[in-house]
Amino acid sequence: MKFHFSTVVVFETLVLIFTLFHHSNIALPSRFEGALSKAIITPAIHWVHHHAIRKDTDSNYGTIFSFWDPLFRTKSETQRFQNMKIGVENLKDTNFVRLMLAPFSRN
């Protein structure tokens, strides 16, 4: 299967824009956030993916559209809250090389 170069550029541009948006720390008004999150991934939805609790980290994988996670049952029921700790659950080792190798270990 072949894709036109312009198709790839448009796709990657959209992914970049949405990634920048949902990784931002923008606090949207709750009613607007609720309505928008029915269609696209918002910062509050994606923030939970970075929560320091493993079950939340293993959820909310969507990049643009918010229907994928419910469809594949990867949507977390956790709602973002003030002072939500982000990071890796029970992380004690901060050595850069070991952190980069961590996803490949069996721990």
Image (spheres, grey):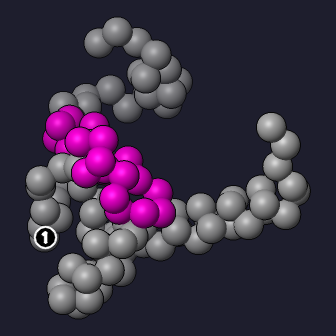
Q: Is 64 covered by the magenta stretch? A: yes
Residue 55 is a magenta residue: yes
Give the x, y percent position of residue 85: 19, 54
- Kindly identify the residue that appears in the image at 17 percent across and 64 percent down: 80
Reply above or below: 22 against 3.
below
> Which of the pair 87/30 is nearer the observer?
30
Task: Looking at the picture, tell me which residue is in the foreground, 105 or 41.
Answer: 41
Say which quadrant the C terminus sits in: top left
Residue for point 80% across, 37% down: 1
For mark 1, does the 10 Å Cα neighbourhood hold few (<14), some (14 to 19), or many (20 or more) residues?
Answer: few
Q: Is residue 83 visible?
A: no
Tell me if residue 21 comes above or below residue 15 in the rendering: below
The amino acid type of the residue labelled 1 equals Gln
Dividing the picture into quadrants, the one containing residue 9 is: bottom right
As rendered, which of 57 and 90 lies closer to the eye? 57
The percent position of residue 60, horizontal first and vertical second, equals 30, 50
Magenta span? 52-73
Q: Secondary structure at mark 1?
A: loop
Q: Quadrant of residue 5?
A: bottom right
Disc 1: which residue: 82
